[in-house]
Amino acid sequence: MLSIEEKTRICALAADSRKANDILVLDVGPLSSIADRFLICSGSSDRQVRAIADAIREELSKQGEKPLAVEGYDQGTWILIDCADLILHVFDDETREFYDLEHLWHQAAKIDVAGLSPAPVAGG
């Protein structure tokens, strides 16, 4: 089982690999019993939103992780991927702006996505 840090890093990198917009990780644990973290990102079309969600699910699967639930895939405007301690919200840009989860969860601490990248390998 992956740690929350590993799971968050894998999902953020997978989203970035599909050119997700504005990847944001929020520490919602102190504010909610739903999850420890939210990862929020968006794409410019339903096709890109699905590609981001597919990449995330594929990378989790490679690590032996399977989401508890995936909702909204067919519509492609807001795909929610429930990984228990990490909930991923993959929006199209318009839907993300409308629901504005960043504002709704403004009290949550932001986790630096750049800090989630794997450390460079020495000598490589």
Image (spheres, helix red, strand yellow):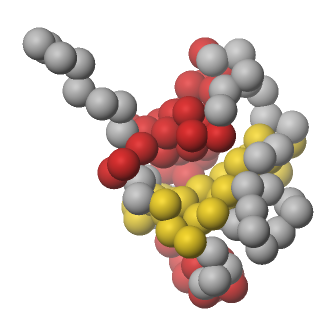
Which percent across, then down, holds residue 10?
52, 34
The image quadrant that residue 103 belongs to is bottom right
Which percent across, then down, holds residue 31?
77, 73
Vertical placement of residue 26 versus 3, above or below: below
Measuring 54% from the left and 60% from the top, which residue is drawn there? 25
Question: Is residue 103 visible from the viewing direction of this image?
Answer: yes
Using residue 68 as the reference point, say whether residue 41 is left or right of it.
left
Using residue 43 as the reference point, say whether residue 5 is left or right of it.
right
Which percent across, then down, holds residue 81?
74, 47
Question: Is residue 42 visible from the viewing direction of this image?
Answer: no
Measuring 82% from the left and 44% from the top, which residue is drawn there? 84
The image quadrant that residue 124 belongs to is top left
Q: Residue furthest left?
A: 123
Vertical placement of residue 50 versus 10, above or below: below
Measuring 77% from the left and 27% from the top, which residue is drawn there? 66
Q: Nearer the viewer, residue 32 or 80?
A: 32
The tally of labels here is 0
Rendered-image quadrant of the N terminus: top right
Vertical placement of residue 116 versus 93, above or below: above
Measuring 70% from the left and 66% from the top, which residue is drawn there? 28
